[in-house]
Amino acid sequence: MNLPVRNENASDTFEFSILRSYDNNRLQEFVEINLPKLVNDQKYAYRNRNESSRKNAPGGTGKSFLINLLLAQIRSSSKIVLAAASSGIAATLLSGGRTAHSTFKLPLNVLFDTEYVCPIRKNGPLGKIFQETSFVLWDDCTMSHRSHIEAIDRTLKDLRCNNKFMGGIAFIFAVYLCGGDDIFPAQLLKIGNGTLENENGYISVNHTIGRVVNNVEELIYTVHPDIFNLSNKSYQWLCERAIISPRNVTAVEINDIILLKFDGHSREYLSIDTVTSTDDGIHYPQEFFNSLSPSGFPPHKLKLKIGALITLLRYLQPLNLCNGTRLQIKSLRNNIIEAGHLKEKLHFSKNYSMIPSDLPFSFKRLQFPVKVSFAITINKAQGQTFKYVVVDLRTECFSHGQLYVAFSRTGDPNHLDFNFNRKYNKKHHNILRSFIKFLF
């Protein structure tokens, strides 16, 4: 059996993918065919692309289509242009797209250090690429914290020895995606713009946005009505519905509840946590490493059931799947997980080691690069569309943009439900004033 093995020396690195040669003739042909298809607003954005700007695009106006056309036009003139998005799934919609964290080497955790710069060497291969870059397009930048954008600004100024905004690179921030011109998308746009009527930063929710459920149990049964029979549901049925939460901790809580409720063969996989330095082995016991759950890491105790949905946490090059891809478990063995993606069957082995980069010490975790994903975070949901969505708002969103992304994952308010913390009296705190001031 040919199992996917991670190749640390693979040539498809980020630097290589940027510098790979594009067929200028094919790119120019793509531009000539699709340029006449632009409507007036798209043409205006296309013509005014040479300056740092923010592009608003309600859904249905073809934001992704316009972005890929811009990328093709700029690359056809042999210039370097980077395409970034705030999640892996959203990045797959862009030609040559990568996540913002991968593109700019951003830390997984939000840093409030006003002097932080990204760990990119000025004389290194990635630093030289940024020195020659002409354009950067960032889709749904409102999903990232302002400290990340400020860190990128400081980094590019230093790399390019240029004190202009973003080191003089033309930055295009593409934001806001929802559909139509009826009441529901109009309300969503007000949330995205931060203009919805509020009291001290709190907004009132009503039936024009969605329906309110009373507790977590009702929230789960709303999106999974036949929960005891989930193991027999198809991949398509499961992937057209999702529970979305602002925080990982609440998503994990809901996933644990769902796993207990539905029938199916279950297994528990324990990770192997080892230190990378012998000195750390003296200072930290094994139990301490087992208790850690760094961002983007699978847990030490990975509990799975056949039929459950899982999310891929790391890009697997031989399978060409990005992080954030949702799969359905088909079988569980001692050291192999068989999962289905549409009509394909994939096999994961437990030979994938991960080392966190945002801790004061270093350790290595050997575990399957997956986690249960009936409930996912808003960041992971970005770029995906579902038929049925429930949003767990017991914990606050950190910005209006994050709440907007959560509510706009479906186009029908009758298929959108949410639960909230009762102590907020049916209001949800979603606006962070400093974030609005920075972006707008």
Image (tube, helix red, strand yellow):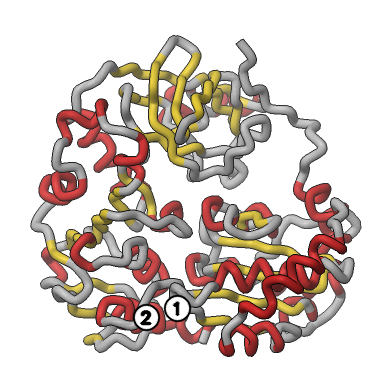
Query: Does 330 sit left or right of 10 as displayed?
Result: left
Residue assigned mark 2: 189
Residue 415, above or below 297: below
Q: Position of residue 292 (x, y in %)?
A: 44, 35
Mark 1 residue element: loop
Residue 372 position within the rendered picture, expressed as x and y whole percent measured from the top left? 37, 35
Give the residue at x 34% y 25%. 303
Kindly identify which residue carries mark 1.
58
Looking at the picture, tell me which residue is in the foreground, 37 or 316: 37
**Would residue 146 be visible to someone looking at this image?**
no
Instruction: Identify the amino acid type marked 1.
Output: Pro
Residue 197 falls in image quadrant:
bottom left
**Image-quadrant location for residue 79:** bottom right
Pointer 1 or 2: first along the chain: 1
Rendered image: mark on residue 283? none
Furthest-left residue in view? Answer: 214
Task: Say what secondary structure mark 2 lies in.
Answer: helix
Residue displayed at 78% across by 41% down: 12
Question: Callout 2 environment at 10 Å: few (<14), some (14 to 19), or many (20+)?
Answer: many
Question: Residue drawn 57% across and 38% down?
Answer: 314
Up-down relation of residue 316 to residue 76 (above or below): above
Quarter of the image containing the N terminus?
top right
